[in-house]
Image (cartoon, rainbow, N blue to C red):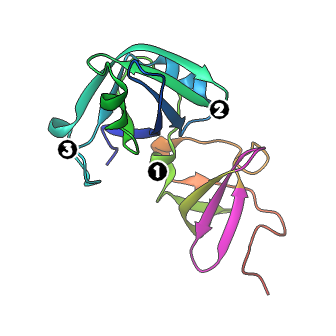
Amino acid sequence: MKETYLETGKIVSTHGIKGEVKILPWADSPEFLTRFKTFYLAPAGGARADAGQMRPLAVESCRVQKTCVLAKFQGIDTVEEAAALRERVLHIARDDPHIPAGTVFQADLIGLPVFANGEALGTIREILSMPSSDVWVVRGAHEYMIPNVRAFVPELDLSLGRVDVNLIEGMQTDAD
């Protein structure tokens, strides 16, 4: 089942004295987060929250600073209030209208079965973010590291509930 809220970044520090926070984005680019008018916080303590427990944070302002995002939330007006949010994970709502059509989230890929030439390889267990592309760690009888590029993943259609890939020599990491 697809999650209603998706983790999208972590508040790593405060910025200035007027309640701004610095967010380390978990997205392809920090600019992605500047599209949103509302972020959500799960209850403190790290437990998974259901939709009714999420606390909305309305965005007053949001801008990119290098590889991070600086955000000011309504009702967070002091450095002390902002500091209380440090190390908290921010979420976005999956049905937010600011998410472009066709966007694929890592959370939707984890656990998908992977096939090559009709043969089951295993499931996507982890996604490594590398400078040139994401690399999927697929585990089954063997382990594979598959770059998410068109040459190896010609089409990604999540409605199929599986991923078909093209393998080349060297992708199997536990080969003899």
Badge 1 or badge 3: first in the primary sequence: 3
Q: Which residues are magenta?
A: 130-146
What x and y, as percent, mark residue 98? 44, 17
107 is higher (above) or lower (below) than 167: above
Q: Amino acid at mark 1?
A: Gly
Query: Could you tell me how far apart the alpha carbons at marks 3 and 2 are, in whole angstroms?
Result: 30 Å
Say the numbered circle drawn on residue 50. Answer: 3
Query: For mark 2, does the 10 Å Cα neighbourhood hold few (<14), some (14 to 19), or many (20 or more) residues?
Result: few
Q: Between label 1 and label 2, give the one nearer the viewer.
A: 2
Query: Can I make out residue 16 in this image?
Result: yes
What x and y, as percent, mark residue 75? 26, 18
Q: Mark 1 highlights which residue?
A: 161
Badge 3 or badge 2: first in the primary sequence: 3
Q: Determine the secondary structure under disc 1.
A: loop
Q: Amino acid at mark 3?
A: Asp
Q: Determine the secondary structure under disc 3.
A: loop
Q: Mark 2 highlights which residue?
A: 67
**Discs 3, 2 touching: Cβ within 8 Å:** no
- Toward the top, the furthest residue is 60
Query: For mark 3, does the 10 Å Cα neighbourhood hold few (<14), some (14 to 19), or many (20 or more) residues?
Result: few
